[in-house]
Amino acid sequence: MPLSRFTRGARGWAALILLGTAASGWAQSPGEPAQPVRSAILFIADGLRHDSVTATDAPTLLTVRRQGVEFANSHALFPTVTTPNAAAIATGHAPGDSGDFGNAQYIGYPAFEHGNFGRSAGSPVPFLENDLIQGDLDEHAGGNFLNESSLLALARARGFNTAAIGKLGPVGIQDVSQLSPVNGSFSVPTTIILDDSTGSPRGVPLAPAIQSALSAAGLPLSPAARRRSAGDVDAQGGQEANTEQQRWFADAATRVVLPAFVAAGKPFVLIFWSRDPDGTQHNQGDSLNALTPGINGPTSRKAVANADANLKQILDYVRGSPQLAAVTDLFVTSDHGFATISKHELDARGHFTHSYAAQLIYRRPDGSLEVRQGSLPAGFLAIDLAHELGEPVFDPDIVQREDGSAHYRRVDPALPASRTSWQHPVNGNALIGGTGAVLAQSDARIIVGANGGSDLIYIPDHDVARTRRVVEFLARQDYVGGIFVDSSFGAIPGALPLSAVALEGSAQTPHPAIVVSFKSFLQQPGNLLSAVQIADTPLQEGQGVHGSLARDNTFNSMAALGPDFRRGFVDTLPVGNADIAPTLARILGLELPARGALQGRVLTEALLGAGTSNARVRRGTLVSSRSATGRVTRLEYQELAGHRYLDRADFR
């Protein structure tokens, strides 16, 4: 592609790349024919459901499926939330190896306990969609909290040009060791990182050449703020997709980063993470306190179209140069599926939950209504569990500093909200028992990380009797859809081991003792788009969520197109997000190292030149022993060549 097509700023950045990086990672032995140099673009449409890809809303995504490979039997990993799947996409490993168990998880210490990034100690259950949090985790883990190398890090080390662009959190995870702080602050990374925090004091800094290239392209040095809306009981929610912010990301990719990479004449790996449709589906206002249309209304459809437009812009750039298109493979995925939130209905017949937490009325300190009686507030699991055990509850997301000491805000569900207490944890995370003091290691007896359609439960002192009591309590709750327990506690009636869902491995972050998936149901039998699920979230009934082990959440959207993929091929074998990094590594001539064994497979059946697959898929079901209530956790899965793909679980 002639340099005259690039902006002056991109040309300058390309010169910096040529002078400042190593040679290409491809090599050949004397006498061997030269191998074609490959580049890869990985496009993630966050929260895109397989069945929401239509000719009307997502023509580009549909074209990729039809012209390339459609993965018709695809899978997200459980918990079906963003960062565990981002880590799987990055490294090819399940959460049991990466240690990324949820968007909110217990990390074993209060974040920033060393004053890293100039911040005082905070939550021991932080939200991982944050560059500063990931950098702090890296510092405690010797530079890479995931404990596995990512595809982007490997490509960077082998001389590829690399970039991660889009949604704050999963973008940083793609090359998370680049976020390891130096002297308490970020250094300029080799991988180009552009996310929500770019240009702010909280963000990863940009090289001066990138800043110049953005300005030369007529782009500001930071993206617009993303669209969001309140999840309060009477909040209308949003009516527009996240178009403005994502347009900046797409423009940065096609007007600055890709031109610079092409001008450098080297192979590259670019990852683009679209916040839509996820962000808009979470906050859409088409379904205020109603299950219909839920996340199937016009605003959610705009979000699908928004992601599709971003993909089209990138694909048009690649196809604008036959030379570039001939050496560039595109892989499209979503991190998880989605469902409509229920705050009280348990099934399509409209039966309501009998949760203790749902029987209370929740108000703000000013007296205004926040959660109606009969509805589950954020933190309902922690409230119910603390009520059962007679223990106090503290909100780890609110640190109060008084008289020289720091403590977490007390939660008093049955009392009016006040300045020093609240009726429920603001995000659902909770410390149960203990003093509520901010300590190097929490003295809480139980710690809950709320993740929408699932919650992580930690027992820091590994007390077996307490763990069994918690499982017995969960087995009596009408909102539970599956219980999984760390196998070190032994078999517990009603629960399956965490190893059954790839949550036990070589991870170096604290393992949850228990993971609970919440109940889900279909409003229309057989239609995954009509899915509804109970969720531990501040969002309202009728908005969108994910996180459970239900097929509407595990069935994501995957497709591939390019010189190394088959054309017009429908892959019916089970595939998943952990298979992407090994597959792209094979195409790029790289070999991913591995510490843990929970690794994905190379999707050889989808690659050009693949013959008819003789692989045998085994469908299996695991059933726990019966709880005292007579119910069991039942897990359905598919298995191929030793790789397990999770379909769904229930508790009945």
Image (tube, rainbow, N blue to C red):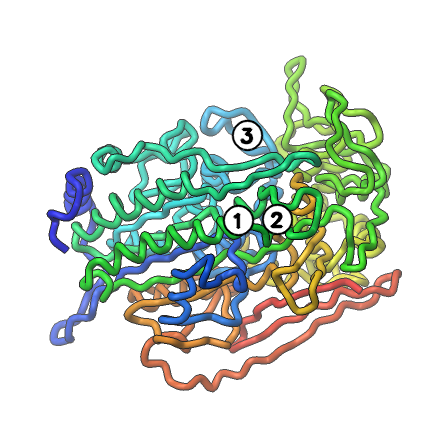
**Residue 562 vertical placement versus 433 (above, below):** below
Foreground of the two, 412 or 338? 338
> Alpha-carbon distance for marks 2 and 3?
34 Å
In percent of width and height, residue 585 lies at 35, 64
- Dot 2: what SS? strand
Q: Residue at x 50, y 77 (%)?
A: 572
Pointer 2: what residue?
A: 544
Residue 253 visible? The answer is yes
Q: Amino acid at mark 3?
A: Glu
Q: Is residue 366 left or right of residue 568?
A: right
- Dot 1: what SS? helix
Q: Amino acid at mark 2?
A: Gly
Q: Mark 1–mark 2 contact, CB under 8 Å?
A: yes
Foreground of the two, 284 or 380? 284
Q: Residue at x 69, y 60 (%)?
A: 487
Give the number of callouts.
3
Pointer 3: what residue?
A: 113
The numbered mark, 2 or 3, whose residue comes first in the sequence reads: 3
Q: Is residue 381 left or right of residue 199?
A: right
Say which mark, if any, is on residue 278: 1
Q: Residue at x 64, y 52 (%)?
A: 293
**Residue 312 vertical placement versus 639 (above, below):** above
Q: Residue at x 74, y 22 (%)?
A: 365
In percent of width and height, residue 443 lies at 71, 34
